[in-house]
Image: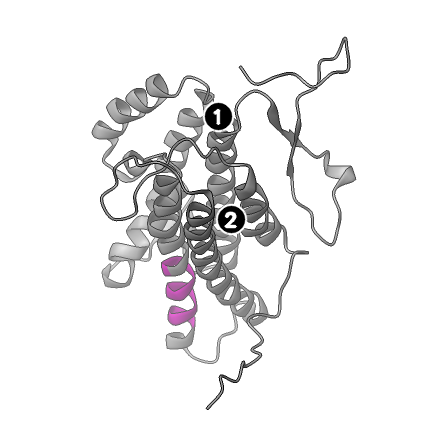
Amino acid sequence: MAFQPQLKKIADFGTNEPWFSRTEMTMLEFLPYIRTDKHVDLVTSKDIPADFDKKKEALTGRVMALGEELGQAFISLRHIRAANGMFPTHLEMVKAYRDLYSHLWVAYKDRFQKLMKDLGYDIGFVFQSDEAFDAKAAEFTKARPDIHSELMDRIKDDKLGWHTALRLFRDEGEHSTNEPTFEGHPMQGLRSAEVIFSNTWHAMEDIFICCMQEEFGKQLTIFEIPKEDRDRANPKKYVVGLTVDTETGEVKSRT
């Protein structure tokens, strides 16, 4: 029997959602520009000669897996928005928030971390204890001087805020006798849900863009699109372009 393809509606949201445009869509657009002189084997984690097509295929899978987790988190957030605090039952409320935070944590700690590792950036230290973080962050920055040091300050601030709140809720929240809170607000509340969802995908965007600036070298540059110039149908924030000499107008060579 011949294979019969089936059309499925994957989701009812698209690139007009900033989180989708600026994570999955931007990452997929950046993949063709990655350097091909390095590669991390997905099984052994050792550097091997790069095969561009295979590398791109593997990374595309990583990006789509990340997008799936963020998409499911977004669906949970929409349910929370629609309920506006008026869930039919307490259990349905608990499930909505548990689903939201679980998908966000999996997206950040598992899917995103694996994507970055396959790109050659081991960010496992982001999820280690505060004591281990400082030493590992310093090693990471020293090994990659092209990555702006302010990124580590941003990640550390995140760990002291929404990152820890998300982790604790994911690991302990449903078993705690006290209602989990974030910045003085209940985790099972629309404000916390909106802020933590936003912070999570923004953190992944920031880490990815900072690392990709090093990946592209000196000829290709990541440019930020001014907010007023972003396409409402696809409001991506960053685009790849050529580095041009401001005096001669010529494209600078890679050094």
The residue beneath circle 2 is 195
Q: Position of residue 184 (x, y in %)?
A: 42, 46
> Considering depth in this image, is 159 or 63 the residue closer to the camera?
63
From the viewer's perspective, is residue 20 above or below residue 241? below
Q: Which mark is residue 222?
A: none
**Residue reaching furthest to the bottom:** 1
- Find out whether residue 98 is within the magenta segment: yes
The residue beneath circle 1 is 214
From the viewer's perspective, is residue 115 above or below residue 17? above
Residue at image coords 52%, 61%: 74
Q: Secondary structure at mark 1?
A: helix
Q: Position of residue 108 (x, y in %)?
A: 39, 48
Q: Quadrant of residue 169?
A: bottom left
How crowded pointer 1 is (Cα within 10 Å; few <14, some 14-19, many 20+) is rated as some
Q: Amino acid at mark 1?
A: Glu
> Considering depth in this image, is 81 or 29 the residue closer to the camera?
29
Q: Secondary structure at mark 2?
A: helix
Q: Which residues are magenta?
A: 93-102
